Image: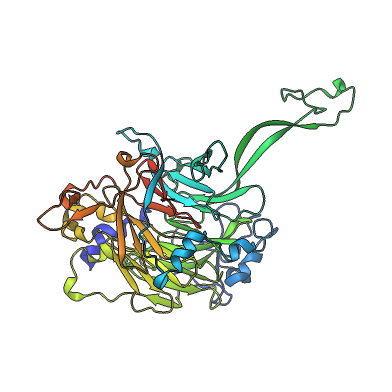
Amino acid sequence: MGAILKPRTLPRLRAAPSRSRPRSRPRSRGSPRHGRSVSPPGPRAGTGRAGPGPGPAGPRERGAGRAAPAAAAGCGARRAGPGAGRFAPSVPPSLAHRPFSSAVVARAAGDGGGSSSEVQWCFLQVKGAIDEDVAEADIISTVEFNYTGDLLATGDKGGRVVIFQREQETKSRPLSRGEYNVYSTFQSHEPEFDYLKSLEIEEKINKIRWLPQQNAAHFLLSTNDKTIKLWKISERDKRAEGYNLKDEDGRLREPFRVTELRVPTLKPMDLMVEASPRRTFANAHTYHINSISVNSDYATYLSADDLRINLWHLEVTNRSFNIVDIKPANMEELTEVITAAEFHPHHCNVFVYSSSKGTIRLCDMRSAALCDQHSKFFEEPEDPSSRSFFSEIISSISDVKFSHSGRYMMTRDYLSVKVWDINMENRPVETYQVHEYLRSKLCSLYENDCIFDKFECCWNGSDSTIMTGSYNNFFRTFERNMPRDTTLEASRESSKPRAILKPRKVCTTGKRKKDEITVDSLDFNKKILHTAWHPMENIIAVAATNNLYLFQEKVN
């Protein structure tokens, strides 16, 4: 096991530990059930820092403070800051029970919950340049629909966020319904440099998560490796004119030149979409952030890096609470890292996180504010006869997602997708092989680092179908209630309007049929890591390098 862990899996922490061997932190004087308060470094005055000062081993780590109010435990965290109602109103009725389109509901209510006819996907749109030489900054790194599906956000490695808005059907364009056009583009993160550690912080957007819409504006969270930002996207179609102390061009007027009192008026103007940063949550993670998840109370959210998970309040930027910490006192004893984390869609006290060992831990913040001890532990027993050098690498979970109902959760490892019942911990209830034909190619995939690719997965609106990506710009859908799976390709060759996608097949035997492709012909530089499914309709978004493909179900 040591030979596997040292060379590849665990050293991808990307943050150099201290040369001095850290000693275990002293406990605070309070109860051991109290949460760890994580405050950004800086002057103590005004930061609300509590707990002991620097630890005995070298420079003080972030998160050394250990005081935690009751807000850190369970749903009480929604009261953690002033003005909590601003971003945390009561749950809208439309979100408490998500409405599905009639087509999706009918498909889920068929024979055994499935459909007798296979879904036919047709091309809708493709966004992005056709250039063969793709700039690194243009590669899409995350895709996310909002709660209604009318907005679709993408983030790239250049730190940009592009938001697409769904067009409404009009009499002049009866078929325009479903098309997404650019709504807003803004620079979310800039490259930074950590002078204390001599590390460059990339501007790449790792995750985007939407908040439910409560008024005319939209809010979303975006994060790079270190910093999380809350953005407000709003429209403005009027401007004020007739100021007393300003000229029409905005310059200030001398007070003695004001000879009359005017009442400013609002004049119509061209629609302008503004993206403004409202909160910046920084300096709480030593390692690189891999996940953010908004809680069902819509007041708090979690952020996870390789070794820790922090709980934030949307109104409080200078403090978070460390709810999971798996960092050992001696870093040489490190055997696994956190790979993904997500809140339960309905219970604000429950969350899960996955590890590089292929295990999932479910934690309940009602039992303890510090969730280092899990409530449930999900792991599939390994077959000793199939163990190899690559076993631990390919079993590492790259994504975990709760179903919309909250009954199931889905995990993606390198070769398969597994569906778990949260009431059964010993094995998954469903296992779908994504590209089992690559098992014989693991050695070459290890050499070119493709074996470390992090594939994501997603549910459809009724939890009856799951989707995930593969190589050669292939992506796969699995119908849970019918023994049927489909392999499709995101390609500009089939990008004719409303063109039906033809299923693709990979030849795993000696004889290749006409429409099949051999394993040796797969292009491992073309990969689909990020996918998203419309929450209420059969519309999917697939990110292929710098292109965003949109497909929808064929409508007769």
Q: Specify whether residue 226 is in view.
A: no
* Percent coordinates x, y for residue 355 in the rendering: 36, 66
* Percent coordinates x, y for residue 377 in the rendering: 39, 76
Q: Specify whether residue 129 is in view.
A: yes
499 or 536: nearer the viewer? 499
110 or 56: nearer the viewer? 110
Looking at the image, the residue that sits furthest to the top is 257
Which residue lies at the image location 29% right of the left edge and 49% below the top edge?
Answer: 502
Question: Where, quadrant-wise, is the N terminus in this rendering?
Answer: bottom left
Horizontal placement of 77 versus 249: left or right?
left
Looking at the image, the residue that sits furthest to the right is 260
Looking at the image, the residue that sits furthest to the front is 556
Q: How many marks?
A: 0
Q: Is residue 142 above or below residue 184?
A: below
Q: Is residue 357 above or below residue 287?
A: below
Where residue 258 sits, quadrant-wise, is: top right
141 or 322: nearer the viewer? 141
* Percent coordinates x, y for residue 108 in the rendering: 45, 67
Where residue 81 sits, quadrant-wise, is: bottom right
Which residue lies at the image location 54% right of the left edge and 42% below the top edge?
Answer: 167
Which residue lies at the image location 81% right of the left edge and 22% below the top edge?
Answer: 254
| Colouring method of the image | rainbow
Which residue lies at the image location 57% right of the left edge and 52% below the top edge?
Answer: 42
* Percent coordinates x, y for residue 426 in the rendering: 34, 79
